[in-house]
Structures are given as structure tokens and as C-alpha cells.
Image (spheres, rainbow, N blue to C red):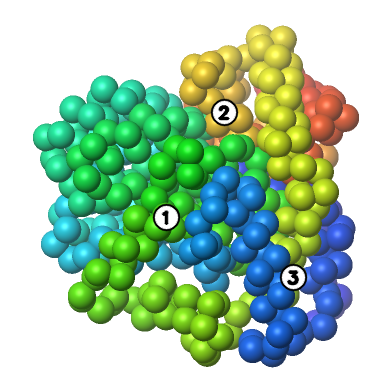
Amino acid sequence: MPALTPPSRLLFGPGPSQVEARVYEAMSKPLVGYLDPFLYQVFDDVRDGLRAVFGTKNPYTLAIPGTGSAGMETAVTNFVDSGAKLAIFVNGFFCERIAEMGRRHGAQVVRAEKPWGEVFTQEEARAFLEKERPQVVAFVHGETSTGVMQAPEAITRPAHEAGALVIADCVTTLGSVPIRVDETGIDIAYSCTQKGLSAPPGLSPFTVSPRAVERLAARTTPNSVWYLDLKLLMDYYDGKKYHHTPPVSTFYALREALAAIMEEGVEQRFARHLKAHRSFVQRIEAMGLKMHVAEGKRLTTLNTPRVPEGVDDASVRKQLLDEYGIEIAGGFGPLAGKIFRIGVMGPLATDPNLELFFEAFGKCLTVHAAA
Ligand SMILES: Cc1ncc(COP(=O)(O)O)c(C=O)c1O
């Protein structure tokens, strides 16, 4: 085989996002065994770092092997018993995935629906949940398919009034956007490593509130998915009892990414991302483009400007990749051809990087608007 030579990209897409050199370096460090005390120190550092970015004191905070979808499946399989009622707030692609997992796990899935790009108000959530009285509620905090951010309290307050546990998909928010799990009352949150945390994909950060831990302990039916059974996973992480062989190098990477976040300061990192988002929107509007999502409802790490009339978004994306090595994504489903999806995360969330991006993006748009 020839030497492996991946192209050097600027990852302005929805994820994976740009990874810093120190994180790649951490991945090349020597492996240790799955019960090595050193690895348990790494686990502890990772779990502390995850608590800081999730905004929680939950002891039950860990990283599940697998990508964001593994976290989603862990949430569903552990907290939604077969026959239980699962209420889902559907306003994009990833809520549909939770609904599909719920169905496959035998839940009775009920849906509140909104067009792609809109959010739910607390009144709407309350009316729906009072009628349905589900055991579990799920919503997506940052919907990557639309660029919308759902305020957690709009869902958690009425859900708790109805006696339900709340699952939040934080795949596109953790590490770059405040989630404040304890303050907002989210019971179960999962994420990924390859977006707001600026690490490679492969682990799914996960946290569980004490109330949800109680619900889990009271569960009498065995979890049908052995690999994602939280009780067994915690026996490994807390009880040092073999369950699976963890992806050691990916844990090193996540630890290093979290170390970089701690050095910057969690709040400072959130503020940097918000500033970059505001600067992004200003620049987009100065070009005469419009954002798909209304101000105040935007996912600040994944921007979704509308594709201008007459422009073929795929040609713009192709030129950006071929000539500038810049990756962005297009819309899909009802938003196919209508929006660009542009991530401004991690090391790229700075003014000089936005400058660089807009210079290339502006040129490509001009070429394809004229074509
Ligand atoms: C909001 C959301 N949820 C879940 C997922 C699934 O994550 P993964 O692709 O890491 O399995 C994604 C992936 O982009 C996502 O954006």
C-alpha cells in the first residue's frame, strides 16, 4: 500500500470539526491495558472534564464507546422500557432518529411536530405533555440538520410537571455551547467527541441525573442491548470489572481536547464561539444572504445561511473543497438545496479563520451566481 496521505482540510462542516495538533499527538502515545491504573486516571480526568462542559455534578458521567448515535441508543435502551410512552419533539432529522430507535425498542412513540427550522415554546410543550403523560421525553438541543437550538427549559419544566424523565441530544452543542445540565433539569444527556469538543469521533459523552439513576436502578426488565447497558458500563468504569476493551487512544484524545478546553476556560470558550457566531452572521448579512433560522433560535456553532436564488449549492461546496480545501455541508430532506450548513467550532472559531473562510466562500458564490 502507498503511504497514507489524507488531504489537509479546513473543517467548516457540521462535524467532524478541526482537531488541534496536541490532540493528534496524544493519540500516538503508548497503549495501556483496560484495567491499568493509568487508564483509570485518564477516565477520571475525562469524567471531570465532561462534568465541567456539561455543567453538572452528576457522578454518573462517562464516555460511552461509539459515536453520538451510540449515546442516543444508550439513552433509549436504558430509559425507555418496551411498552413505555416516549414523547419526542420533532423539528429535524435527528429527532426522527430518536423516534426510530424508540420504535425499535418497543416504545409507544408520540410526536409533537414543527417545521424544520422552528423551536417549541414551553406552552406548546406543556399542552402536548399534559395530554400525552409520557414516561420519557426526548428533544434535540442543537439540531444539526436545520441550525436550530431548542431552549432546554421549554421542555424540561413541563416534562417534570408531567413526571417524565428528559433525554437531551447534545451532540452538536457539548463543548462549545452552554448546556448547564443541572440548572436546566436535563436528566439524560449524550453527545459526541467530533464537534464542539474538537476531538476525533469515537466516544459518546453521557451524563445521568440522580433522579434518572434511581429510575434505572428500579428497572426490573434486563436491557436488551448488552453492550450499552449502563449498569454493566458503570461496573467497568466505577467497579473496575471488565466489560469491553475501551478505545484507549480515543480516550487519550478526548482527555487532551478537554485539557485544552480547561486551559482556555469553559466560559471563555463558550464566549469565543458566541462571538464567532455573531461575526459570522454579520458577514453573511453584509453579503446580502439570509439566515434560515430566526435570531435567538440559532444553533450558534452550526450556521445555516439560505442558498441565494439561482445558486447551485453543490457547485459552491465542490469548488470550496477542490480549490481551497474547505469543507462545508448542504441541507437535506426538506432543506436540500436551500441552506448551507457551516460549522464554526473549536480552533476555527476565531476572526482570522472567519476572514479566511469568507474570502473563499465569497469568491465561490460569485462564480456560481454568475454561472
Ligand atoms: C444532533 C445529532 N444527533 C445525533 C447525531 C449522530 O451522531 P454520530 O454521527 O456521531 O453517530 C448527529 C450527527 O451529526 C447529530 O448532529
Q: Secondary structure at mark 1?
A: loop
Task: Please give the residue where the numbered disc 3 appears in the rendered image.
Answer: 252
Q: Which quarter of the figure has residue 255?
A: bottom right
Which amino acid, mark 1?
Answer: Ser
Disc 1 versus disc 3: distance between alpha carbons? 26 Å
Q: Which residue is depicted at the point 29% across and 75% down?
A: 223
In this picture, is 344 found above or below 226? above
Residue under numbered circle 1: 209
State the image coordinates of residue 97 (x, y, percent, origin top left).
36, 52
Q: Position of residue 83 (x, y in %)?
A: 14, 62
Single out the mark in the foreground, 3 or 2: 3
What residue sits right under mark 2 in the picture? 304
Residue 291 quadrant: top right
Marks 3/2: CA–CA distance: 32 Å
Q: Amino acid at mark 2?
A: Thr
**Which quadrant: the C terminus?**
top right
Question: Taking 353 as reference, is 46 left or right?
Answer: left
The reply to whether residue 154 is in sight is yes
Q: Nearer the viewer, residue 168 or 371?
A: 168
Q: Residue at x 18, y 27 (%)?
A: 127
- Secondary structure under the numbered disc 3 in the rendered image: helix
In the image, residue 90 sits, relative to residue 295, either above or below, namely below
Specify which label sits upstream in the sequence, 3 or 2: 3
Q: Residues within 10 Å of mark 2 (few under 14, many from 20)?
A: many
> What separation in Å lies between label 2 and label 1 (alpha carbons)?
32 Å
